Amino acid sequence: MSDTPRVSVTYENHIAHVRLTRPDKMNAVDQAMIDAVIAAGLEVAESDARVCVISGEGKGFCAGIDVGSLGAMIGKDPDDLLMPRSHGNGTTNQWQEVAMVWTRVPMPVIAAVHGVCYGAGLQLALGADIRIAAPDAKLAVMEMKWGIVPDMGGMVLLPRLVRGDVLRKLTYTATPIDARQAETWGLVTELADDPLSAALELAEMLTQKSPSALRAAKALIGFAETNDADAVLLEESRAQAALIGRPHQMEVVAATFQKRAPKFD
């Protein structure tokens, strides 16, 4: 295994910037990348950052699984590899955690997608709250190419974003689509000629919002996606009661009336 770092994490102006740093391999996911991405997610989750941006260095966001690393699985029992719930408080395996860890990061996560975003790379991007892509980026649910199915959280995340027929076509064919089609189908939030600059600009704007309200909103949206209406209505009230009158909310009100930028502790 190479000692070359797979991921870097930097913090500036309340923004955590997570970069995939394997450009010579199009940021392909090997075991070292799996470990590094999960570690980055856990680190950011414990930080005081208000927003997180994920990007890939080089010519592409992430080309998917490093096929060469699959050789390490030969001769091993797939059940032994895949079935243990070793991550996510006993809910995921290590491959699933690459994407799902970002859904549990409490602050908003923005993925800046350029070049290729295939397979494992797409599922990583799906773990973000928002995806900003270059118009010429290519995205694919690539697993069928190798005779397998999406298994890195894709089947939790994709049905929240796209229609069932679109999901089936993407999964059955493994055909790459361009970012414009991806935006139309719901895989991509918006397009930008420079997605990283656009992601950082959005992140900067979000740092001016109440940090506690942003975290509460992300948690509430996640709850709403997986619970019934009565439970969601109750959770709305609980989340709101925890915000009203607290320092961040009062600072937002004061800053609004005083026509100034808010200052959060």
Image: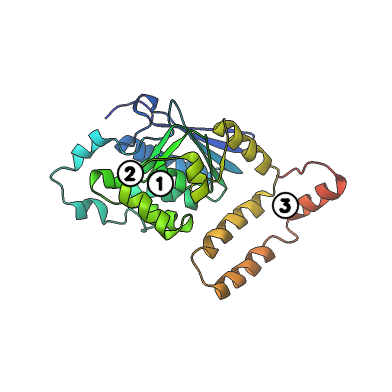
Estimate how packed mark 2 is, as few (under 14), some (14 to 19) or many (20 or more) residues with alpha carbons within 10 Å: many
Percent coordinates x, y for residue 11 in the rendering:
57, 33
User: Disc 1 and disc 3: Cα gap in Å?
Assistant: 33 Å
Percent coordinates x, y for residue 159 in the rendering:
43, 58
* Left/right of residue 147 with respect to residue 259 in the rendered view: left
Estimate how packed mark 3 is, as few (under 14), some (14 to 19) or many (20 or more) residues with alpha carbons within 10 Å: many
Q: Secondary structure at mark 1?
A: helix
* Left/right of residue 73 with respect to residue 101 in the rendered view: left
* Left/right of residue 192 with respect to residue 178 in the rendered view: right
Give the residue type that dot 1 points to. Answer: Gln
For discs 1 and 3, the disc positioned in front in the rendered view: 1
- Residue 35, image quadrant: top left
The residue tagged 1 is: 123
User: Disc 3 and disc 2: Cα gap in Å?
Assistant: 43 Å
The residue tagged 2 is: 142
Q: Residue at x 57, y 69 (%)?
A: 232
Q: Residue furthest bottom?
A: 230
The residue tagged 3 is: 248
- Upstream in sequence: badge 2 or badge 1: 1
- Rendered-image quadrant of the N terminus: top left
Residue situated in front as seen by the camera: 177 or 223: 177
Quick check: marks 2 and 1 in contact, CB under 8 Å? no
Give the residue type that dot 2 points to. Answer: Met
Give the residue type that dot 3 points to. Answer: His
User: Disc 2 and disc 1: Cα gap in Å?
Assistant: 10 Å
